[in-house]
Image (cartoon, rainbow, N blue to C red):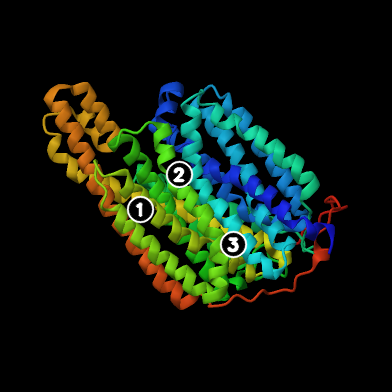
């Protein structure tokens, strides 16, 4: 047994640490928004881009970053990504304006796009097939729990320090990951050394960025506004060009024939849909906790602890369950459990016990954990080990697109229902106050506090009631989507996984990534 194989579980620990900080970066600001409004005087548009600049750059570059890792070495990509992420975190902590914070968050997204696919692709090459599903399950558990840990971390930090400390805590973690990674993480690359595909990379960045811009901005600008229609039009047009380009290349960046494999397509679909539900739920829940239940940022973060704990517990178990009863059965069952969790969540009201809230989060987390890990293993099983970076990027991209869609679609449904329920309470208010009250429950509570007296109390109570009703209807829609997804997965995903290539321990090495003497570009 090689040294690399003997220390594979230590390698996994370093990879999971690296993964955790970039996943937390997606949700760490969710409970910090009120603080950023006060400290940086950020507008609504700036607030949205402080959160979304990270996700847009992150997701837009994933395919390109995964392909670069396959080509030049995954450990090198991981190292460069961590350095960029740490640098962006340090700059973000000392931003003097909202625009500076947006720029530094984009830089962090660039680093994250190199880190996340590298972690899964290195893992896939280090572990032999009989252990790979279990290792992927642990990876998926960390990835899922990281989304819940973000608000917890933010709440703890904001309770004791200034907002910039949210980013500063990344720096020692990055340093630890870099130091441990230098010793414990081997490298690997695609042995075929396929020529680079700069045109395919550029097209993938363009269509993904245009798609995500439309999804993110649609709720604010209006789904039928010229900017959003142009954005989706560009995304569709460039995607068509991208597919034609990749299909005619001898060595495509993303071989589209992988989509004919049910394990690849079914796994990607399941990942996208479960993150649609997960990120949409986070968006609704943070507002419910802070504005309806009057939780502080710290309390809101701690309230999500049952979700993170459940994911860390259930995800590693999902691999063994899938081995016994089949991947398709576990993934479909997980989505049904997600739907059940959404049903429990719909029963919440302003004065529900914390037990009901925690119970709904536990059910949701269990279903998501059963779905995420086997779906990720399904995607990775469909590709040769040399293309693990691209497979990881596919897994990560569907997560980001699904999450962005969840926030946009469920957020739009929530806003529409909330506005409809609140309108009868706004008669007699100035136009500006009505607009602020219908923009969000936080805006309505701000108007109510300025109004004061009986009128203010009535508006505050009505806004909370309207939000709870809107949230209940919205999570039921999310539950219906999960049930539909379960039915589709039951038809598409194979019961058992078959890895497309034999494990080769010589594929991974402790030797450093060496730069190519001359990069090869083929334009066909």
Quarter-of-image position of residue 100: top right
**Could you say which is closer to the camera, residue 495 or residue 53?**
495
Q: Nearer the viewer, residue 390 or 167?
A: 167
Q: Are marks 2 and 1 in contact (CB under 8 Å)?
A: no
When the figure is inspected, residue 391 is found, relative to residue 100, above or below; the finding is below
Could you tell me which residue is drawn at 22 percent across and 21 percent down? 450
**Neighbourhood count class around disc 2 (C-alpha, 10 Å): few under 14, some 14–19, many 20 upward:** some
Say which label, 3 or 1, has the lower sequence index. 3
The residue drawn where x is 65% and y is 59% is 200
Q: Please rate how many residues cluster around mark 3, counting C-alpha atoms within 10 Å: few if below 14, some from 14 to 19, many from 20.
A: many
Q: Residue 257: image x %, image y %?
A: 61, 73
Residue 218 position within the rendered picture, expressed as x and y whole percent measured from the top left: 38, 47
Q: Which residue is mark 2?
A: 305
SS under mark 1: helix
The residue under label 3 is 242
Residue found at x 62% / y 48%: 19
Q: Point out the tag, 2 or 3, that comes first from the N-terminus.
A: 3
Q: Which residue was labeled with disc 1?
A: 360
Position in image of residue 157 (x %, y %): 51, 29
Query: In what quadrant of the picture does the N terminus appear?
Result: bottom right
């Amino acid at each position: 047994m090689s040294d690399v194989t003997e220390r594979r579980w230590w390698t996994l620990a370093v990879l999971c640490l690296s993964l955790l900080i970039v996943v937390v970066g997606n949700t760490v600001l969710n409970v910090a928004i009120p603080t950023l409004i006060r400290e940086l005087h950020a507008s609504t548009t700036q607030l949205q881009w402080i959160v979304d600049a990270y996700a847009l750059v992150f997701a837009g570059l994933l395919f390109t970053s995964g392909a670069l890792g396959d080509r030049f070495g995954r450990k090198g990509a991981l190292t460069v990504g961590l350095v960029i992420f740490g640098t962006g975190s340090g700059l973000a902590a000392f931003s003097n304006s909202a625009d500076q914070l947006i720029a530094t968050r984009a830089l962090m997204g660039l680093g994250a796009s190199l880190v996340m696919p590298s972690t899964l692709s290195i893992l896939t090459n280090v572990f032999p097939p009989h252990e790979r599903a279990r290792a992927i399950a642990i990876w998926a558990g960390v990835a899922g729990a990281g989304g819940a840990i973000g608000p917890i971390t933010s709440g703890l930090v904001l309770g004791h320090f200034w907002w910039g400390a949210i980013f500063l805590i990344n720096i020692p973690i990055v340093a630890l990951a870099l130091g441990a990674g230098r010793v414990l993480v081997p490298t690997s690359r695609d042995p075929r050394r396929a020529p680079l595909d700069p045109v395919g990379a550029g097209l993938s960045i363009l269509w993904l960025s245009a798609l995500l811009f439309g999804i993110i901005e649609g709720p604010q600008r209006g789904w039928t506004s010229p900017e959003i229609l142009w954005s989706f039009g560009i995304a569709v047009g460039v995607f068509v060009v991208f597919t034609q380009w990749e299909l005619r290349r001898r060595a495509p960046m993303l071989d589209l024939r992988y989509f004919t494999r049910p394990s690849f397509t079914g796994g990607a679909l399941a990942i996208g849909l479960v993150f649609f539900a997960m990120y949409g739920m986070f968006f609704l829940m943070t507002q419910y906790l802070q504005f309806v239940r009057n939780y502080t940022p710290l309390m809101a973060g701690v309230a999500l602890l049952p979700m993170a704990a459940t994911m860390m517990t259930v995800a590693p178990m999902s691999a063994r369950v899938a081995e016994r009863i089949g991947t398709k059965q576990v993934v479909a069952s997980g989505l049904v459990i997600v739907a059940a969790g959404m049903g429990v969540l719909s029963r919440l009201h302003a004065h529900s016990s914390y037990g009901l809230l925690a119970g709904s989060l536990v059910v949701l987390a269990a279903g998501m954990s059963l779905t995420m890990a086997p779906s990720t293993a399904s995607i990775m099983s469909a590709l040769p080990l040399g293309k693990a970076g691209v497979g990881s990027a596919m897994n990560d991209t569907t997560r980001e697109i699904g999450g962005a869609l969840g926030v946009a679609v469920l957020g739009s449904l929530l806003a529409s229902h909330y506005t409809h329920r609140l309108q009868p309470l706004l008669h007699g208010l100035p136009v500006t106050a009505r607009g602020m009250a219908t923009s969000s429950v936080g805006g309505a509570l701000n108007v109510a506090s300025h109004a004061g007296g009986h009128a203010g109390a009535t508006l505050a109570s009505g806004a909370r009631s309207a939000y709870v009703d809107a949230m209940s209807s919205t999570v039921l829609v999310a539950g219906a989507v999960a049930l539909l997804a379960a039915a589709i997965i039951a038809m598409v995903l194979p019961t058992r996984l078959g890895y497309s290539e034999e494990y080769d321990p010589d594929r991974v090495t402790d030797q450093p990534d060496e730069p190519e003497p001359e990069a090869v570009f083929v334009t066909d």
